[in-house]
Image: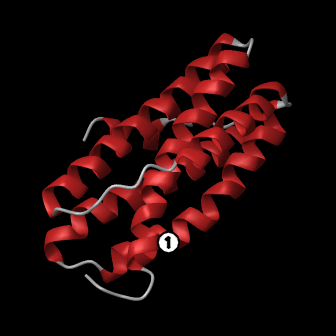
Amino acid sequence: MKYPQYKTDLQRIHESEVYGRAVFATAARLTRNAERKAKWLKLRTLEEATLARYLAYMARTGQTVVEPKAWELKGYAEGVVLGLMPWRLAMRLVRDATGPFQEKFLRLKQNSDEVEREFFAYVYAHEKALEAFAVKELANEPGSLKAVDSLLNR
C-alpha cells in the first residue's frame, strides 16, 4: 500500500495509541468517581490492545517503529486536565479528539489491500468505538462501552 501520506498515517496509529494510553491512565488516576475511573481504565485497555496490534503489524511487515515520546508527554498533560474537569466537558473533548485520527485511519483502511484490510479496519473501528463511547456518555445512554468491549473481545 503506497499513497503520499501512508508513512505519516501509519505513524499516527502509534502516536494515537501511546497518547491515548497516557491520557486515559492519567485521567483514571485522578478521577474520584469509581464508575468513571473504571471507564477510563477500559479505554486505556483498548489503547494498549491496539498498540500491541500495531507493533505486531509493524514487525510482521518489517517496518521501522519510531517511538513517539512527545505524544506520551502530551497524553499525560491532557489526562490531568480530563481527569479533573467536569465529565460532560471531558466527553466532548474525547468525542472531538477522535475526528482527526479517524480521518487518517479511514484513509489507511480505504487504501489497504486485502491482506492489510483487517488490521486497518480494526484501527478505524477502534477510533469509532472511542467516539461512540463519548457520544453515549453525553446522551446518558446505557452501554457506552459496548463497542469498546466488542473490540477487546476480538
Q: Is residue 63 left or right of residue 84?
A: left
How many numbered marks are there? 1
For image coordinates 72% across by 13% down, the residue present is: 33
Which x, y percent locates residue 88? 81, 38
The quadrant in which residue 149 appears is top left
Describe residue 66's horizontal placement relative to residue 101 as left or right.
Answer: left
Q: In this orientation, which residue lies closer to the viewer: 69 or 54?
A: 69
Q: Residue at left 73%, top 39%?
A: 78
Q: Which quadrant would the N terminus be assigned to in this image?
A: bottom left
**Secondary structure of residue under mark 1:** helix
Question: Residue 126 at x, y = what percent?
Answer: 43, 51
**Rendering coords of residue 109 (x, y %):** 35, 73
Nearer to me, 108 or 8: 8
| Residue at figure coordinates x 32%, y 82% from the top left | 111
Tag 1 residue: 104
Give above or below for 114 relative to 17: below
